[in-house]
Amino acid sequence: MSAGDDVNEQIQQIADAYRTVTIKGAWYGPTIAELIGKIPVELATTAPVPGAHSISELLQHLLLWNERIRNTSEGHPMPRWEAEKEWAEPSIAWKELVARWNKSRDLLEERIRNFPAGDLAKQVPGRSYPYQTMFHGILQHAIYHSGQIAMVLSMLQSRGR
């Protein structure tokens, strides 16, 4: 197996892992798609405690980062992260948000699968790390926020008992 084949295999493994953590088959519990598929709008838009993020805010954050990663992987500089602006985006209606997240998830997986093998070790524009790190980071980001979504959902559902 050549070095190019190894890199292509690595890209496919990253894409497969992204699919697993976002769609189905995660070893640790429900994926984002499995979680959001059973959340009614009234729970999606309710914060579990004052000052905390709702499920819809968390999903909108994931949508934003899917789009950023996809755009950056196409050679555009990664925007600077500004928390106060990031969480101040206008709300998207729940059904539209779920549809947009699903589409962004599919587009990002496709982009990862088709990412040029020779570029995986190149530096991300506007950052000090390579694309390989960025793609592994979006996996970690999805896992982190799926845990948050599961926890918020559990908190909200326990109120109704």
Image (spheres, rainbow, N blue to C red):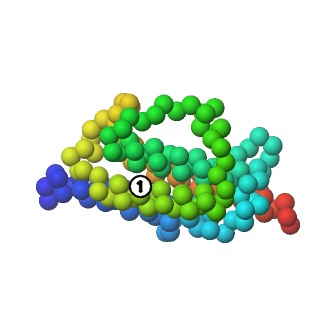
Camera-side residue of 46 and 103: 103
Camera-side residue of 94 and 141: 94
Secondary structure, mark 1, is: helix
Left/right of residue 57 with respect to residue 138 in the rendered view? right
- How many numbered dots are placed on residues in this image? 1
Left/right of residue 140 with respect to residue 12 in the rendered view? right
The amino acid type found where label 1 is placed reads: Leu
Camera-side residue of 23 and 70: 70
Quadrant where the image shows the C terminus? bottom right
Quadrant where the image shows the N terminus? bottom left
Q: Residue at x 72, y 66 (%)?
A: 40
- The vertical placement of 139 against 82, above or below, is below
Left/right of residue 3 with respect to residue 77 in the rendered view? left
Q: Check disc 1: other Cα within 10 Å, few if <14, some if 14-19, many if 20+.
A: many
Q: Residue at x 80, y 47 (%)?
A: 49
Residue 138 placement (x, y as % from top left): 46, 48
- The vertical placement of 57 against 99, above or below, is above
Residue 147 placement (x, y as % from top left): 61, 54
Task: Find disc 1 in the rendering and name its residue.
Answer: 108
